[in-house]
Amino acid sequence: DAKTTQPPSMDCAEGRAANLPCNHSTISGNEYVYWYRQIHSQGPQYIIHGLKNNETNEMASLIITEDRKSSTLILPHATLRDTAVYYCIALSLNSGNTPLVFGKGTRLSVIA
Amino acid sequence: DSGVTQTPKHLITATGQRVTLRCSPRSGDLSVYWYQQSLDQGLQFLIQYYNGEERAKGNILERFSAQQFPDLHSELNLSSLELGDSALYFCASSVGRSGLTDTQYFGPGTRLTVL
């Protein structure tokens, strides 16, 4: 699976959009980009995933560049409860049921 | 609520002891994964089961073992415990469809403290 690179930390004002970048320059054509977050000591929570098209759900939007070498997770109106560590993971599904490889993620602090 | 349950929530024990952590996957999920999260190592994959069979192994110590039962719940057994085994242990489950997107959903974790 491709390695991903994320900034170690970011701040965001409450009510503003939080844009979390992820670099995955070695991603291959069959690897999805998955985002999870972990609120302090809770189990990681699935947010969204995508292959090459932009995706949106009730939690966030995922923007993947055309060359697929990077992506951005967007939380449109960040709240204090969005303070968490966000993990970007490239996941190949050729073999199915692939374990997740977590990096250090980005620690997002939403500030009132 | 992810639908994955883990018991117990907290466990305090002494070095040299043995403990069992239990996980019940979401209804219909065939795959169960175990992860360990310690302060210095981050979240690390330990072992995966699919429909009762071991599917993949990660950084799991020989002192640790796991199994998945016919009702699909799983247990992680940790023996000869050391101080360094103190960590959060998470279980995740997924449907287990091969070759398709297969999102993992995590339980709330078991916090193990070895004194």
Image (cartoon, rainbow, N blue to C red):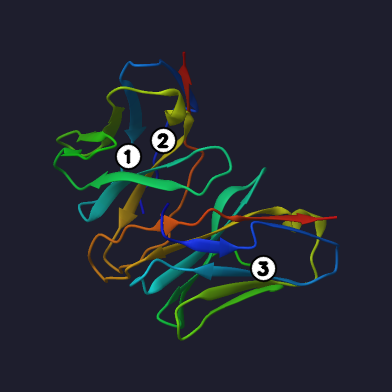
Q: Residue at x 41, y 55 (%)?
A: B2
Query: Mark 1 vs mark 2: which is more N-terminal?
Result: 2
Q: Secondary structure at mark 1?
A: loop
Q: Is residue B111 above or below residue A68?
A: below
B104 vs A111, left or right, is left
B110 vs A61, left or right, is right
Q: Is residue A38 above or below residue A74?
A: below
Do discs 2 and 3 belong to a common subunit? no
Whole-angstrom CA distance, mark 2 to mark 3, is 28 Å
Q: Residue at x 13, y 41 (%)?
A: A53
Q: Secondary structure at mark 3?
A: loop
Q: Is residue A21 above or below residue A25?
A: above
The dot on residue B61 is 3
Q: Specify few, some or many for label 2: CA neighbours under 10 Å numbering under 14, 14-19, or 20 or more.
A: some
Q: Are marks 1 and 2 in contact (CB under 8 Å)?
A: yes
Residue that label 1 marks: A24
For disc 2, the chain is A
